[in-house]
Image: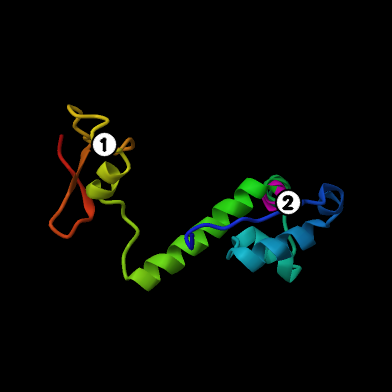
Amino acid sequence: MSNHFHIVLHVDQTKARNLSDLEIVQRWHQLYKGNLLTKKLERGDELSEAQMAILENMIKELRERLMSISWYMRRLNETLARLANEEDNCTGHLSLSAIHGLIPSGSLKAVQIVPYNLWTGRQIRENKRGAISECEP
């Protein structure tokens, strides 16, 4: 199958925990843009006590994310999905026909799938192009 992969990972937590705050920020910036505070730290700019307190909590979270295999897999899958979408010239929206395709035929004869956006409470319907869109309930 060409649509999956196997990967073996090991996180050296001792080494990761011994990285300096600057090294954590530099590694994070290799993956993401960062924010004003992380960029200031990387440049060596002077930071106030309040900024340092915020940055300490932020770096703690970044360190945990960089050590997390789940976070790594999320990032890897997102990147692969974006590349596949670009190659297929699509946006990555899941169509209702794809949702119906996930259910084996004949297993649920009288069930109607009516997806809802859990954030807005609005019903989602398929438009003419096959993409999904929200509609009023």
Q: Estimate how packed mark 1 is, as few (under 14), some (14 to 19) or many (20 or more) residues with alpha carbons within 10 Å.
A: some
What x and y, as percent, mark residue 9?
Answer: 72, 53
- Residue 135 forms part of the magenta stretch: no
In front: mark 1 or mark 2? 1
- The furthest residue to the left: 128
Residue found 42% across the figure and 66% down from its top: 84
* Viewer-closest of 65 and 107: 107
Q: Amino acid at mark 1?
A: Tyr
How many numbered discs sit on the rendered protein?
2
* Viewer-closest of 115 and 54: 115
Relative to 46, residue 114 above or below: above
What x and y, as percent, mark residue 91?
Answer: 32, 62
**Which residue bears the numbered disc 2?**
52
Q: Chief secondary structure of the magenta span? A: helix
**Which residue bears the numbered disc 1?**
116
Residue found 74% across the figure and 49% down from its top: 49
Which secondary structure, mark 2?
Answer: helix
Residue found 72% across the figure and 65% down from its top: 26
Relative to 58, residue 47 above or below: below
Relative to 132, residue 2 above or below: below
Which secondary structure, mark 1?
Answer: loop
Q: Which residues are magenta?
A: 62-67
Q: Quadrant of residue 106?
A: top left
Q: Estimate how packed mark 2 is, as few (under 14), some (14 to 19) or many (20 or more) residues with alpha carbons within 10 Å.
A: some
Q: Amino acid at mark 2?
A: Met
Q: State left or right for residue 97 relative to residue 62.
A: left
Numbered badge on residue 40: none
